[in-house]
């Protein structure tokens, strides 16, 4: 007979340990998060399936899933969970581990967007949309996507040409201090 | 009355008409909005996906600035910024170790003296004044109030309105004379920042919201979040093309609708910046 899996022990040995809420163990698969999730239809695993995979120690499958990358962070799951599990935070935790490990994402465009966004904030201190869109295009090589939308926004006065750089040196300091701290842990 | 004002990145760009209309309305109510000097990005969605500590440190930096400038309350119109501020305050208050890490990263301590307020909050406190000053003709339109995700969720942190069926925006717009409708997509998600990566999902979700609004008989949708506005307004023709349908439902910031009843000119409210032209709908009053 196969030996039983002790979920609390699996969680401690998981690469996600410390980055996701411990009470993930309380999930009893009621499916409220799955039914409320607006993006579940596009995911490869529903949120409760992903939670169970975490508890079964399936780190590789969890980190390779589309599910966390499609999460829109709308917080419906966290709001409705009868066990008080912050499921949206678990999606963040999985993405953080995947990024830290330098993995490819099952949804490459989503990863490209987040990475570009972080770089943008780090560089300019404030989000500089034109720079964000330009860098994203270089990463995804989708040069024509949203081009006419962007032009129209520009003519409506909704896109700034120049970045601001206000407070950018302070923000860069925060980024490097965070990195130091995280390396130490 | 004076508030510190944190416009956030989007109100200086894609949501510029939210900034324009919120400022214009506040001025008519003698609310002084003083932009926080040296403010920086709250981290938005990229930061919390990349690093938890970063996602808390970035908003706290701005709260430290606000505290040093002596503000007890800051107005934060962007739903994403508002959510990041509330989360950062909540988490550092609950988790002393995290608070110590943030203090270490910033080299400064946040004393917890600044309260972020959403415009729905500041204006909800002034319903009577709004009603008495709303003397201009009110457009005869049925408005679906769309709150989206982050203003109300998760409720234990946001502690704002009812999380599944909020009414604050309805009550404000009703106070100035609009008819707002009951409908079922008030707090559904528009797909938010997936617009720039998985655009198709955003088109699907916006389709459902627009369908609901249309089915409930709405002539217009009012929003309180710049990302909701961008998705529902600038992507509406894409939604129409994908689902072979026609909506032409103007998307307003709720502050723009208030502004019209206070007699503020459409240009001052940024109404010309929308993709779905609201002017035909407003033709009778402006």
Image: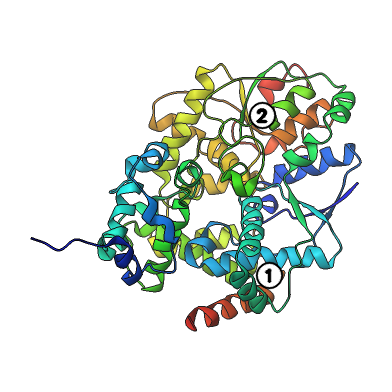
Q: Chain of mark 1?
A: A
Q: Chain of mark 2?
A: B
Residue at 80 percent across and 24 percent down: it is B176
Residue to which mark 1 is pinned: A165
Q: Nearer the viewer, residue B247 or B32?
A: B32
CA–CA distance between discs 2 and 1? Answer: 39 Å
Relative to residue B108, is residue A128 drawn left or right? Answer: left
Residue B115, position as x, y percentages in the image: 76, 54
Q: Quadrant of residue A39?
A: top left
Residue at 77 percent across and 30 percent down: it is B258
Mark seen at residue B167:
2
Near mark 2 (Cα within 10 A), the count class, few <14, some 14-19 or many ≥20, is some
Near mark 1 (Cα within 10 A), the count class, few <14, some 14-19 or many ≥20, is some
Residue B33 seen from this side:
yes
Relative to residue B195, is residue B44 drawn left or right? Answer: right
Mark seen at residue B50:
none
Asked if marks 2 and 1 touch (Cβ < 8 Å), the reply is no
Element at label 1:
loop
């Amino acid at each position: 007979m196969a030996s039983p899996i002790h979920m609390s022990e699996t969680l401690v040995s998981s690469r996600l340990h410390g980055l996701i809420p411990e009470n993930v163990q309380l999930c009893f698969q009621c499916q409220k998060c799955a039914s409320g999730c607006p993006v579940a239809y596009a995911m490869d695993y529903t949120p409760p399936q992903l939670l169970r995979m975490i508890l079964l120690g399936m780190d590789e499958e969890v980190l390779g899933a589309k599910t966390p990358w499609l999460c829109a962070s709308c917080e419906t799951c966290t709001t409705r969970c009868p066990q008080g599990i912050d499921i949206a935070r678990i999606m963040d935790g999985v993405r953080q581990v995947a990024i830290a490990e330098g993995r490819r994402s099952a949804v490459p465009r989503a990863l490209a967007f987040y990475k570009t966004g972080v770089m943008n904030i780090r560089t300019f201190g404030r989000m500089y949309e034109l720079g964000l869109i330009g860098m994203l295009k270089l990463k995804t090589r989708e040069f024509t996507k949203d081009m006419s939308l962007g032009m129209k926004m520009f003519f409506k006065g909704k896109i700034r040409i120049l970045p601001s750089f206000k407070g950018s040196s302070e923000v860069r300091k925060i980024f490097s201090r965070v990195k130091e701290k995280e390396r130490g842990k | 009355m004076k508030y510190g004002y944190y416009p956030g990145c989007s109100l200086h760009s894609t949501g510029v008409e939210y900034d324009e209309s919120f400022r214009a309305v506040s001025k008519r109510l003698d609310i002084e909005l003083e932009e926080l000097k040296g403010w920086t990005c709250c981290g938005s969605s990229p930061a919390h996906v990349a690093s938890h500590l970063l996602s808390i440190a970035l908003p706290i930096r701005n709260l430290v600035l606000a505290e040093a400038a002596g503000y007890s309350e800051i107005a934060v119109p962007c739903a994403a910024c508002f959510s990041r501020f509330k989360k950062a305050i909540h988490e550092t208050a609950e988790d002393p170790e995290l608070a110590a890490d943030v203090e270490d990263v910033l080299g400064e301590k946040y004393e917890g003296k600044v309260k972020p307020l959403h415009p729905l909050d500041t204006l909800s406190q002034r319903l009577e004044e709004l009603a008495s000053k709303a003397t201009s003709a009110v457009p005869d339109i049925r408005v679906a109030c769309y709150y989206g995700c982050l203003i109300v969720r998760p409720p234990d942190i946001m502690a704002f309105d009812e999380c599944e069926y909020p009414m604050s925006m309805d009550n404000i717009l009703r106070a100035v004379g609009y008819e707002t409708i009951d409908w079922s997509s008030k707090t559904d998600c528009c797909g938010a920042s997936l617009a720039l990566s998985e655009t198709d999902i955003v088109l699907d979700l916006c389709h459902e919201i627009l369908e609901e609004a249309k089915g409930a008989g709405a002539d217009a949708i009012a929003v309180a979040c710049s990302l909701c506005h961008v998705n529902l307004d600038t992507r509406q023709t894409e939604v129409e093309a994908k689902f072979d349908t026609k909506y032409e439902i103007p998307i307003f910031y709720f502050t723009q609708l208030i502004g019209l009843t206070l007699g503020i000119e459409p240009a001052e409210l940024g109404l010309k910046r929308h993709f779905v032209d609201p002017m035909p709908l407003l033709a009778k009053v402006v």
